[in-house]
Image: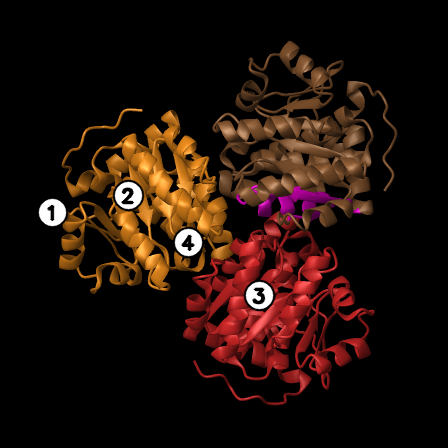
Chain colours: A orange, B red, C brown
Amino acid sequence: MTRTPASRMDACDFPQLAALLLGRLRSERSRVHAITNSVAQAFTANMLLAAGGIPSLTVAPDEVPFFTRRSDALLVNLGTLDSERRKAILLGIATARDHGKPWVLDPVFVEASPSRLEFAQSCLSGEPCVLRCNASEFRALAGCDADLPALQAFAQSHRTVVALTGEIDWITDGARVVRVDNGHPLMAHVTAMGCAGTALIAAFSALHGNALEAAVAAVLVTGVAGEIAGAHSKGPGGFQPAFLDAVFNLDSEILTTHGRVS
Amino acid sequence: MTRTPASRMDACDFPQLAALLLGRLRSERSRVHAITNSVAQAFTANMLLAAGGIPSLTVAPDEVPFFTRRSDALLVNLGTLDSERRKAILLGIATARDHGKPWVLDPVFVEASPSRLEFAQSCLSGEPCVLRCNASEFRALAGCDADLPALQAFAQSHRTVVALTGEIDWITDGARVVRVDNGHPLMAHVTAMGCAGTALIAAFSALHGNALEAAVAAVLVTGVAGEIAGAHSKGPGGFQPAFLDAVFNLDSEILTTHGRVS
Amino acid sequence: MTRTPASRMDACDFPQLAALLLGRLRSERSRVHAITNSVAQAFTANMLLAAGGIPSLTVAPDEVPFFTRRSDALLVNLGTLDSERRKAILLGIATARDHGKPWVLDPVFVEASPSRLEFAQSCLSGEPCVLRCNASEFRALAGCDADLPALQAFAQSHRTVVALTGEIDWITDGARVVRVDNGHPLMAHVTAMGCAGTALIAAFSALHGNALEAAVAAVLVTGVAGEIAGAHSKGPGGFQPAFLDAVFNLDSEILTTHGRVS
């Protein structure tokens, strides 16, 4: 799998880039190995399958290096962080680095437990191409509020891209800052929505050499699919299948019409 | 989060109480830490999110005390009882007791394994505010059939509320006995339905000081939502999203019209 | 639970057999203990419940012998193969053999990790009544391509039935070969679809003494339900509930009209 070279795109091109990467994911069927929490495993796998990728999800430490090597990207999610997952994550990150595979970090609930915060810090030193988090998680990791200068400083000092998701999504590599305004309130009433979105960032990072652009494209796909699903749902139950269907059916026209990137 | 003081309500007030507690859950966004089986984790989280609460689900022993402390209630479910869960459950219960948080016990499949029965007995000695079980589970725990006098005696001697769910649901604190007649046959064809219902009991116990009333209100919400979902479903597949949507949209009028409490 | 005696049926009888076994599963409510991966647990349980069976899913080694003994069949799935699952699987297989319960093997991703391949080989020596796999998994296990003579040779030398699923499904006990042509492309975009199908093979094996016929009937039910669900779905999200509803509502007429067995 060849990654497109890093480039600098104008904001208006992101819907096109998202459509392009979705198209490539569907045809090249990139593999993502996801070491993720037990709550999110099924929805994460279904998100990747809906988008066109191929997921694997084992957390057994002796198997993770093999699964990471045959994958195109690695997702590390710190939810339900039991002892086997801790070992698996460190081995997965080391394997990804050794083999030049992009890897993405989702530090779920890192504000809730000191041991998780410490573990997240040691993961960060492995330089994920993207860190996807919400405001509370960022605050715990950075020790300060999640305002734009703080996001940029953090991205620069950790040599990563920060994708802060919330009502508005902000993505920055320290230099560039992109804002995505898509999404739907029902997304906050479905578990593992953020985790699944991060899995798509990993998949797109496998296909596109610029991590900021890959992250923006994935956040855009998630937000637009959420918006479409939300418009047709009576609640969070129907929203879930509608969201996966929207991801499956997204195309360049829908992304261009609905995408709000600036 | 302040819990309303314990009170004694007439049966006819339960739909109102359920609506009130749902309203408060939606506005106060109570946190429930759920140590639950791996099969039920996603549905339990989605049930709590649909009802307005905020779930967390880690089972790592070193993290459970932190997650329990920052939660408003603890759910302990004995399904898929691996060694890490056993340790986590004992730590969670101890933390809940130390910090005066209500906790609720769901002794899934306790009739199937001697070690699980023994473990459940030691959990019970930690005095959950509510024990939610079915008839087979009660029989294993109590050593006798699940008739009303047995339920009452068990509730009294264990200083808990017993919520026995089945075609008819019975809830008793030893003195009062409440019967709920809602529900739908399709609920028996969806996994983790009971587990999710118990999570709602935990959420309501965080908001209301009388455990019997909190349990009745939660059982009522689950039963009414099941009835509404069942009326619009062709099978257990469509039932699941319809159930979550019904929970999300329940209001005082629907609960009063549909609720059958006596 | 009595299993119908082994028999030899004509291909044209398989839809009838599938309807018969579904009917018996619904009335006798056979129990299947599923030691399966954490991604597939909920969907597998929901598949069994939709079909009429009763699932249990613990992976705790000290409990698995008890759960296996009280079940009518055992499912062993090698996904997310952590250390606790390895112990549980060996104990489960030994218990099933000691008590004459049929057991079925699903060697998920066996091609991806050497330790999993070795473990799968040792499972196979416990003579599952059916091995359900895809072409890559078969290649890893057999050391050769998954053509018909190879499937037959493997079935004979391992004294099992091989059910190879893919665009076309092939089932053989070494002597007889049956081909099933049902299914839908969306099935490949839903996680745990194959795992759930294998659970139904286990359930039918509990009811019918001829493993090849039980496997064909289960593969047929899965394929026909998939076809019906696919015809009414806009994507993999809506497909999942539609699939479970189709399984729940399948009857002799639908199976006869849609079934393509030869």
Residue nearest the viewer, comparing C90 with B145: C90
The C terminus of chain B appears in which quarter of the rendering?
Answer: bottom right
Residue type, mark 1 in image: Ala
Q: Residue at x 55, y 32 (%)?
A: C108
Side of C23 where C191 appears, left or right:
left
Q: Secondary structure at mark 4?
A: loop
The residues tagged by marks 3 and 4 sit, at their Cα atoms, a distance apart of 18 Å
Decide whether residue C33 is among the magenta residues: yes
Asked if the residue under mark 3 is in contact with the one under mark 1, i.e. CB atoms within 8 Å, the reply is no
Q: Are marks 2 and 3 on the same chain?
A: no
The residues tagged by marks 2 and 3 sit, at their Cα atoms, a distance apart of 47 Å
Q: Which residue is mark 4?
A: A79
In the image, residue C122 above or below residue B244: above
Q: Which residue is mark 1?
A: A175
Residue type, mark 2 in image: Thr
Measured as percent of width and height from the top left, residue C214 is found at 76, 29
Q: Are marks 3 and 4 on the same chain?
A: no
Residue B76 numbered tag: 3
Measured as percent of width and height from the top left, residue B49 is found at 47, 62
**Residue density around tag 1, few if under 14, some if 14–19, many if 20 or more, within 10 Å:** few
The residues tagged by marks 1 and 4 sit, at their Cα atoms, a distance apart of 30 Å
Give the residue at the far top of this rendering: C149
Q: Give the mark, 2 or 4, whose residue is nearer the N terminus.
A: 4
Q: Give the mark, 1 or 2, whose residue is nearer the N terminus.
A: 1
The residues tagged by marks 2 and 4 sit, at their Cα atoms, a distance apart of 35 Å
The span picked out in magenta is C29-57
The residues tagged by marks 1 and 2 sit, at their Cα atoms, a distance apart of 28 Å
In the image, residue A213 above or below residue B143: above
